[in-house]
Amino acid sequence: MNGLKRAAAYSIKPNMLERCGPKDAHKVLFDYVTGRADFAELTIREILKQFEVATPYYTLIARANSISDPFDDRVVEAYWLGNGLLDKVTPEAVGWVIEQDVKREGWNPEHIALMFRAISLEKARAHHSLSVLYFFTRPGIELDSLVTKSIQNSLDSCRVCSGIVIERGEQLTVMYQPLLFDYKRIVRIGKPEKKMVDWGILNPNDSAVDTGSVVAFHHYWAIECLSIEQAQNLDKYTKMTLAAVNP
């Protein structure tokens, strides 16, 4: 999967949920990724540039690695799954992109300051899991205990997860490790458990998606089969995010 298709693939479900990007962009992106229709590359790029969370991260990662194209394969993989390009992005740059993100979401200056005092930018990487965790857990900011379960559900839905396929059917059954968020404001990785995942952009007729395959899913929508290295990177950079945002 090249960079442009991967960026499109991971953007489809959030757009369907009206969380990111221009209205109904998911229809074009789905047809593009699955090959149901042909679109000019420029058309897809223009749509993806309107996804306000991901695009600044692509740009940041590309610049830190002297890559001219923010939709370069390596850059997009770094943001969604993780790779060595993330280690070239400075803590100051990560802090800048976080600040722009939360300002756009309407956070007030006091809450922004509290968050930056609570997280470790030295440990943070410009990975998708970072944007998910600081947004939902609001480090350093007092939360109502009643929202804890809602936050946990949002964390697991919005982040990119990996799971091992154990059964194929109308949906994929996978074993994965959820993120747990408790009353002490600690986010941790839970024990393996079963999860039903929609086929998403994967093809049920594709024999390559079989029991034992490792798939990445986003909002419980399967996106792609992962190599061992990609699965390890996703785990590695998710754990680095946990270290950065836990008090």
Image (tube, rainbow, N blue to C red):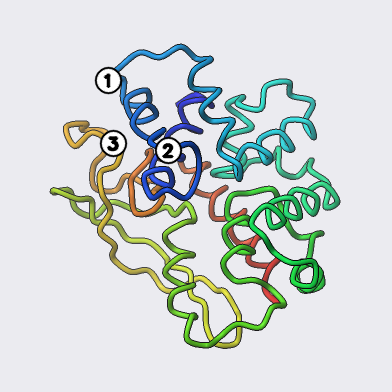
**What type is the residue that disc 3 sits on?**
Leu
Distance from Cα at disc 3 to Cα at disc 2 = 23 Å
Closer to the chain start, of discs 1 and 3, is: 1
Q: Mark 2 or mark 3, which is nearer the start of the sequence?
A: 2
Whether the residues at callouts 2 and 1 have beta carbons within 8 Å, the answer is no
- Residue at numbered disc 1: 36
Q: How many marks?
A: 3
Q: Quadrant of the C terminus?
A: bottom right
| Residue at image mark 3 | 202
Mark 1: secondary structure: loop
Please state if 20 lies on the left or on the right of 33 as rendered: right
139 to 131, vertically: above or below: below
Q: Quadrant of residue 207?
A: top left
Q: Classify residue 104 as left or right of residue 123.
A: left
Counting residues from the start of the chain, the first of labels 2 and 1 encountered is 2
Answer yes or no: do the residues labelled 1 and 3 have beta carbons within 8 Å? no
Q: Residues within 10 Å of mark 2 (few under 14, many from 20)?
A: few
In the rendered view, tell whether residue 101 sits above or below residue 209.
Answer: below
Which of the two marks, 2 or 1, is nearer to us in this view?
Answer: 2
**Residue under numbered circle 2:** 23
For badge 2, the amino acid type reads: Lys
- Residue 228, image x, y percentages: 47, 43
Instruction: Give the residue drawn at x 53%, y 49%.
Output: 232
Residue 150, given in percent of the width and then of the height, sits at 44, 74
The x and y percentages for residue 61 are: 72, 37
Q: CA distance from mark 1 to mark 3?
A: 13 Å
Q: x%, y% of residue 200? A: 29, 42
